[in-house]
Amino acid sequence: MTAPRLGVLVALHARPHSDTDTVIRAVRKDLGSVSPQAVYNVLAALVRVGLVRRIEPAGSPALYEARVGDNHHHIVCRACGTTVDVDCAVGKRPCLTPSETRGYVLDEVEVTFWGLCPDCRSRTVDSPPPIPGPRDVGVHQ
């Protein structure tokens, strides 16, 4: 276990759903000098061995978290991008079953819920129309 690897894990436990720049700043605060490339390499290695999970909400940079090995999903605020964990309400992984697998052996389902967080909702004086999400792109009503 190298100091950068430990620094990244500590940063992600303290700051779940961090982007790479946030992880770099946190590791530098704790360790002093560390190159961005070292942090990128550590993140990739930790994801590869299953100690860190990479999530990619549509329209956002990749986020990393140390909560792995369970069946949870995420809620993302459309306005500020805040991301929080939400446990799966039913079943074991995968908790959604497709109508067909087309020959694939499925081992994971990723679900992202979108909405407005309580802080952004409270800042909304009038109720504007919802901000389009990834599934709304190209949809005409």
Image (cartoon, helix red, strand yellow):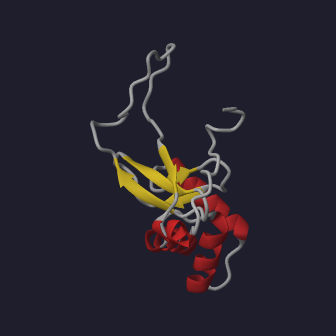
Q: Considering only vertical position in the picture, is 4 above or below 84?
A: below
Which quadrant of the structure image shows residue 109? Answer: top left
Horizontal and vertical percent position of residue 76: 52, 56
List the single residue furthest toward the front: 126
Horizontal and vertical percent position of residue 18: 56, 65
Q: Considering only vertical position in the picture, is 42 above or below 105?
A: below
Q: Considering only vertical position in the picture, is 95 above or below 88?
A: above
Horizontal and vertical percent position of residue 132: 64, 46
The answer, for residue 77, to whether it is visible in the render is: yes
Horizontal and vertical percent position of residue 114: 52, 50
Camera-nearest residue between 67 and 84: 84
Camera-nearest residue between 48 and 59: 59
Identify the residue shown where x is 59% and y is 77%: 27
Q: How many marks?
A: 0
Q: In the picture provided, is 18 more to the left or to the right than 139?
A: left
Identify the residue shown where x is 33% and y is 45%: 88
Identify the residue shown where x is 46% and y is 67%: 118
Identify the residue shown where x is 51% and y is 53%: 115
Camera-nearest residue between 1 and 122: 122
Q: Considering only vertical position in the picture, is 54 above or below 96?
A: below
Image quarter (top left, top right, bottom left or bottom right) of the C terminus: top right
The answer, for residue 53, to whether it is visible in the render is: no
